[in-house]
Image: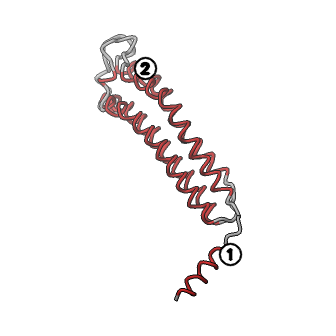
Amino acid sequence: MKQLRRFELLRRFQKEDGAMNIVSILIMGIGMVFLAVGFIMFPIVTTATDALLAYVNAGNASIMAANFTGFTAIVGITPLLILLGFVSASVFSMYLGVKLSKGGGGGKLDLGGLLLLGLSMVFVAIGLIILPVALDGIALVWDGGGDHEGLNVAYVGLEPILLITPLLILISFVSSAVLSGFFGFKQLTGKAAEA
């Protein structure tokens, strides 16, 4: 029995040939980049969300961020979601890199997966840039074109849709960031598993 265990250990050590999986190193490097970018973007995100929470329309001061349905709650939790997203992406990619490096062997670089990972960061930035512009446009329509008479009553059902639109815009950009990051990781790790 002991000889069988020794033989098994020897066989395992003989399989180790020192080969390194380049994809595992790349994925671990991406994990470090995610962590760095997350902490670089966090102050920018909190500044942008502070500006969104303090939004007051220039043409009509009675139109504020609190007037839009569910907007302040989602804007308030967005910095936490973004920070947790970057930290979890970093931890997940480091874990995957270590797991792939234990397998050894070669790997294939997938540019599409890397582009999807980068695109996830771009979605967050674009969402925070577009949102103030969208708020101004929605406030202009809701205000009645700047004449302070409000929305035309002939537009049936438009007001509730206008009030929830900023929330939908923010959720769509955050979910797009999450989905593109997920599929980027899935594509990278799928190619690594095939190698």
Q: Residue at x 40, y 23 (%)?
A: 50
The percent coordinates of residue 145 (x first, y second) are: 39, 15
Establish if 122 lies above or below 139: below
Q: Which amino acid type corresponds to the residue marked 1 in the rendered image?
A: Gln
Using the image, tell me which numbered label, if any, was put on residue 30. none
Query: Is residue 172 toward the left or the right of residue 65 in the image?
Result: right
Query: Is residue 92 toward the left or the right of residue 140 in the image?
Result: right
- Depth check: give the residue in front, 195 or 39: 39
Q: Are marks 1 and 2 in contact (CB under 8 Å)?
A: no
Query: Is residue 128 toward the left or the right of residue 161 in the image?
Result: right
Establish if 128 lies above or below 150: below
> Which residue lies under the disc numbered 2?
136
The percent coordinates of residue 195 (x first, y second) are: 67, 65
Q: Residue at x 65, y 65 (%)?
A: 104
> Which residue lies under the disc numbered 1?
14
Does residue 108 appear in the picture of this structure?
yes
- Crowding around mark 1 (Cα neighbors within 10 Å: few <14, some 14 to 19, many 20+) is few
Q: Secondary structure at mark 2?
A: helix
